[in-house]
Image (cartoon, rainbow, N blue to C red):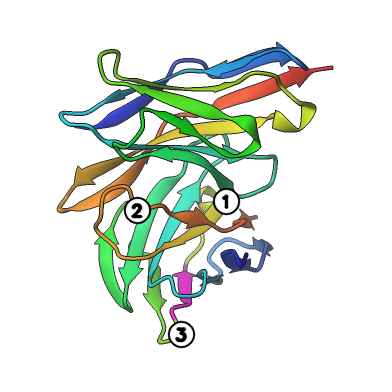
Amino acid sequence: AQSVTQLDSHVSVSEGTPVLLRCNYSSSYSPSLFWYVQHPNKGLQLLLKYTSAATLVKGINGFEAEFKKSETSFHLTKPSAHMSDAAEYFCVVSAWMDSSYKLIFGSGTRLLVRP
Amino acid sequence: AAGVIQSPRHLIKEKRETATLKCYPIPRHDTVYWYQQGPGQDPQFLISFYEKMQSDKGSIPDRFSAQQFSDYHSELNMSSLELGDSALYFCASSTNTGREGETQYFGPGTRLLVL
């Protein structure tokens, strides 16, 4: 069965330092992967997605993620954190289940940005 | 750009009451999905519609029903509300159901509180 595992429930960084949010996936083939961000009391916003094109995917707000098949990882990075990046981040895989594709969410990583 | 619209944004009901949540997809999107996100949880898929027909069903309680109308908007009807139904309900829309990698665009959510 396909799944995603977000390795950290909370990540805390200082403003201006790099961000790394880790995600590992489990799939029998090369899946479609997404990162969504959810700010407090807000909806889910798509940051970026991977669909078997370039392995390095650039998203909005300076975020990017690299698909590494050998490591079954799809980690999200940003060179320099901003206070506005504080939010919950979900790694998501599009999985074939019960005769259709469904989005399977990771458990989320809460990013805290210290001044 | 137009986004997914959900109404109401907040709703307070008492146990055993009914509630109706509405979702207006992005123009020209023909597929609508409903998700439930409990406190501290990741979103769980409830049900989806493609071209006004139910296309997929997840963990939607029998007390809930939904439909998609000719203008592609969707309504989630919830009856005999229970305390455990308190959650954030997301609607998402996309074009063409059943395709891997299809991006779902989420609305801001309706926060339901059952007292």
Q: Which residue in the protein does label 1 denote?
A: B88
Q: Are marks 2 and 1 in contact (CB under 8 Å)?
A: no
Determine whether B31 is above or below A78 in the image. below
Tell whether A5 sits left or right of A27: right
Q: Which residue in the protein does label 2 denote?
A: B102
Q: Marks 3 and 2: which is nearer the front?
A: 2
Could you tell me residue A55's position as x and y percent?
36, 28
Q: Nearer the viewer, residue A62 or B3?
A: A62
Say whether mark 1 and mark 2 are on the same chain.
Answer: yes
Could you tell me residue B84's position as x and y percent?
51, 48
Looking at the picture, which amino acid does disc 2 mark? Answer: Glu
Q: Marks 2 and 1: which is nearer the front?
A: 2
Q: Which residues are magenta?
A: B72-79
Q: Secondary structure at mark 1?
A: strand
Extreme bottom residue here? B70
Residue drawn 38% across and 72% down? B30
Looking at the picture, which amino acid does disc 3 mark? Answer: Asp
Residue drawn 31% across and 24% down? A25
- Can residue B61 be spotted in the picture? no
- Can residue B65 be spotted in the picture? yes
What type of secondary structure mainly makes up the magenta span? strand
Image quarter in which the C terminus of chain B is found: bottom right
Could you tell me residue B38's position as x and y percent?
53, 43
Could you tell me residue A5's position as x and y percent?
38, 22
Q: Secondary structure at mark 3?
A: loop
* Chain letter for the residue marked with disc 2 in the picture: B
Q: CA distance from mark 3 to mark 2?
A: 21 Å
For marks 2 and 1, the one nearer the N-term is 1
Tell whether A79 sits left or right of B81: right
Q: Which residue in the protein does label 3 denote?
A: B71
